Image (cartoon, helix red, strand yellow):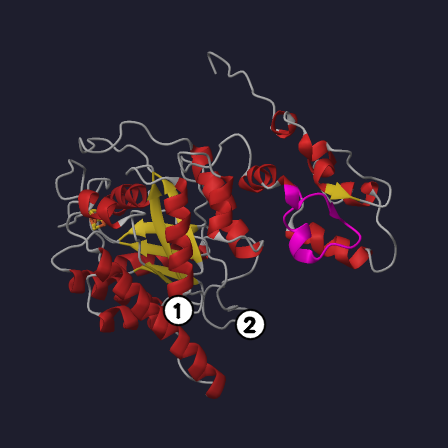
Amino acid sequence: MSGSDLLERLGILADAAKYDASCASSGTDKRSSRGGRGVGSTQGMGICHAYAPDGRCISLLKVLLTNHCIFDCHYCINRKSSNVRRARFTPAEVVQLTLDFYRRNYIEGLFLSSGIVKSSNHTMEQLTEVARSLREDHDFRGYIHLKAIPEADPELVEQAGLWADRISINVELPTDPGLARLAPDKNAARIEGAMGHIGSAIDEAKDARKRFRHAPRFAPAGQSTQMIVGADGANDIAIIQRASSLYGRFGLRRVYYSAFSPIPDASAILPLKRPPLIREHRLYQSDWLTRFYGFAPEEIAEAAQDDGMLPLDIDPKLAWALKRREAFPVDVNTAPREALLRVPGLGTRAVDALLAARRHRRLRLDDVARLTVSVARLRPFLVAADWRPTRLTDRVDLRRMLAPPQQQLELFA
Ligand code: SF4
């Protein structure tokens, strides 16, 4: 096999993988090859980051084993009926590529997914073999994220969890009817069943390691999933509620949102236009609010417009505060952490710094200003030693005052 052939296939299969957003490497065990032991590291410096044309960080070698697929998901460029160039790697080739890329410091690990060839079990076995070989044959200690095939036997997925840091299974669409319409070969119950199985295996492995130090690890960076936004008619509230239910039931580390991007040769049942990227961003902000700021999904729903969509011009926390003005202002010197976290413009770090500082003195508006990007934004919602907003939250034009100014786009940019 020539080097140019390998490069050509890498071009095809790396390009085909770029539509998957779920590749962050956060949350795994710390492993290092310092001291001449093994290859790779999940931490460490000097790792080059690459960015896909759509701006996503791909510091992992993000590639498919193959873009052949026997399924026909309408939103996917690799679906059976798509007219794309196809290619395939053997597990040994992916192992070699990962090691070569790692040694050149191009990547910090591997994100491996695949179209389904022959059968779900066969594909899952091939994916697992890559991870096994990297760990066992080459003592690779870098990060490995495997995309599992929900239709494969649970025992095969379990094998993968012994070698990979993270396992993910995509729920694909926010609603079951959306999945049935756009991915007719997939089954929502099967997908959730596989996620439940992985969740239990992760919990059992954690329990076992509490009791026996050498009990095997299972996907120490947990499991994640991805939802495509804007390919079906699901609104933001439906998406947030589904995400919240997945976090609660399967202990997911992350739900990734991927704005649907129209693909070449697209199926006629898909929308012609991608949703605005800012919609994806607002969903991530809402996700953050539910995970780190104590917001319930129902509260995020309060921030939405009548059509169930989050406003695009302001962030969801500000949108919620504007709808729930009776909850403000809160006193920076006396309010509990939970109340301060709800003030637009105050992040978790700023709130913790304020709580620490107020043990020693009464805080003034300037103290808050030093910890935020824009004090103007939070002034209507906060009381400080030298500041009390006078009926600011009653103003009908408060939203206009706080929304970022509209920008005139350049005609020929
Ligand atoms: S199974 Fe995966 S690779 Fe195959 S068509 Fe569906 S989304 Fe694409």
Report the label total. 2
Q: Amino acid at mark 2?
A: Gly
The verdict on residue 97 being magenta is no
Which residue is more in the foreground, 82 or 224?
224
Mark-to-mark CA distance, 1 and 2: 25 Å
Specify the principal SS of the magenta part: loop
Give the image location of residue 368, x and y in percent. 77, 44
Which residue is more in the foreground, 93 or 78?
78
Q: Can residue 133 be seen in the rendering of this structure?
A: no
Image point 44% across, 69% down: which residue? 220
If you read the primary sequence from the N terminus, does the residue marked by circle 1 or circle 2 appear first? 2
Q: Amino acid at mark 1?
A: Ala
User: Which of the numbered marks, if any, corresponds to residue 320?
Assistant: none
Tell me which segment is drawn in magenta.
326-345
Image point 18% across, 33% down: which residue? 267
| Residue beneath disc 2 | 35
Which numbered disc, 1 or 2, marks the residue closer to the eye? Answer: 1
Residue 16 versus residue 217 in the image, above or below: above
| Residue beneath disc 1 | 219
